[in-house]
Image (cartoon, coloured by chain):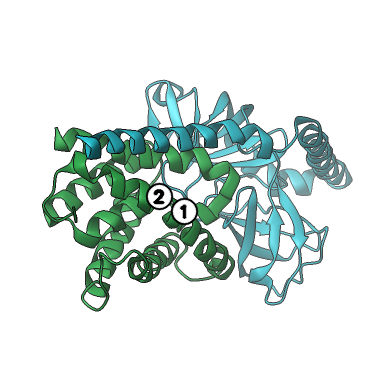
Amino acid sequence: MRLMWLVTICLLALMTTTAYRPLLDSTIATADPAMVLLAWLALIDRMPRIFVAMTIIGLLRIWFGIAEIPDTFVPLLAVIVSVRLLRQYLDPYHPLKRFQILIPALLVGVILQWILLTGGLVGATELVLWSLLLSVVIAGLLLPILDLMTPLLRSARYPL
Amino acid sequence: MKRKKSAYWAVSCWLGLALLGYGLQPLVTPRRSSDAQRMLQERIIQKSLLIDAENASIVDRQLLLDLFLPEASNFELVPARMIPSRDLSPLRSSAVIDRGLESRLAPGMGVIGAQGIVGQIYQVGNGWSRIQLADDPAFVVPFQDEQDMRGILAGGPGRGVGYPKLRLDPLVLAEGDLLYTDGSGGVFPPSIYIGIVDQSRIPARDSVIRLPAGLDNSQEVLVLTPLDVGGSP
């Protein structure tokens, strides 16, 4: 049941990405709801569940697109590792401090993906500046929704 | 129980948010009339490039036959219908065509449309192929400008645009310059329209190239299948 809800939430995140892509163009890369979901899970959840979510998102991206294993899984892993590193210094339960964990982690992910795709940072400056702003808005919008969804995931790690 | 109820509400809210995104899409997609006008302009550019090439061949037919015909005749054109498909990776750009293994298509083959370059075949199956569109960040194509200065163009970072990744000659890009294929690489024949310089910047790699319109629209395309011109049996 918990896994079913996790799959549903992952599908919802991917659906939101495709829905807002024409509106937000490539800036959706950092403000990608699927990445926000993964970063949110990485904030406090257990590693197995984080890896399940990462696998679902990654495999769907590879099957329904031209993404390859490195440019799909390396940025996702980078987001998880960055969140896990930063949460050692900042409180992941704090409603505002978690943004300071999430936004840099999302940035690391998108920059890494850009480097893997193009072999350099050319053209990434504009992408990063716009998407940085947008990722704050998207994360601000999605995090309260995700917080409300915690009873469906039934983890003791989520604050009651 | 109350918390679970609010969780269901949250899921519905998110679904509503996603559906709102789909609903807003028609508002931001370029208006069909302006898109059609741009497509017509680009079709004229592509046609004039081909006429120029044809006229040049009349000047010294034998020389040009020796030089260009072997290369131009190296392709068989396979018509196909391109269906836009939103790639699930936010940075990637791809589409699907209705031809595949049965038409002897293979990854790496070039795809062109009436307006010019479209992309390259990435994955092939029975009755379908997935194309890496020209505005994908991992797409690269050699180009030349009107002064025959060459470079390498890469797609992205936005939709329908690209940038000069590398300069092979000391080329200086000016706004409005037309770029087209130089025939090197064996994927595209020469004189296929790639795009127009939209913003000229220094360094040149920061310039913005506007790729042919309609990359994210359904359209008829041609797949460039290299002919087997192998030697003795």
| Image x and y of residue A60, in percent | 31, 39
Of residues B122 and B37, which is closer to you in this image? B37
Indicate the quadrant where residue B171 lies. bottom right
Residue bearing mark 2: A142
Q: Amino acid at mark 2?
A: Leu
Chain under callout 2: A
Indicate the quadrant where residue B151 lies. bottom right
Of residues B91 and B144, which is closer to you in this image? B91
Give left or right: position of B171 versus B26: right
Residue B153: numbered disc: none
Give left or right: position of A27 versus A37: right
Please name the residue shown 65% across and 70% down the image: B206
Residue A18 position (above or below residue B204): above
Question: Element under label 2?
Answer: helix
Please name the residue shown 27% across and 43% down the image: A149
Who's cyan, chain-wise?
B
Q: Amino acid at mark 1?
A: Ile
| Image x and y of residue B122, in percent | 43, 41
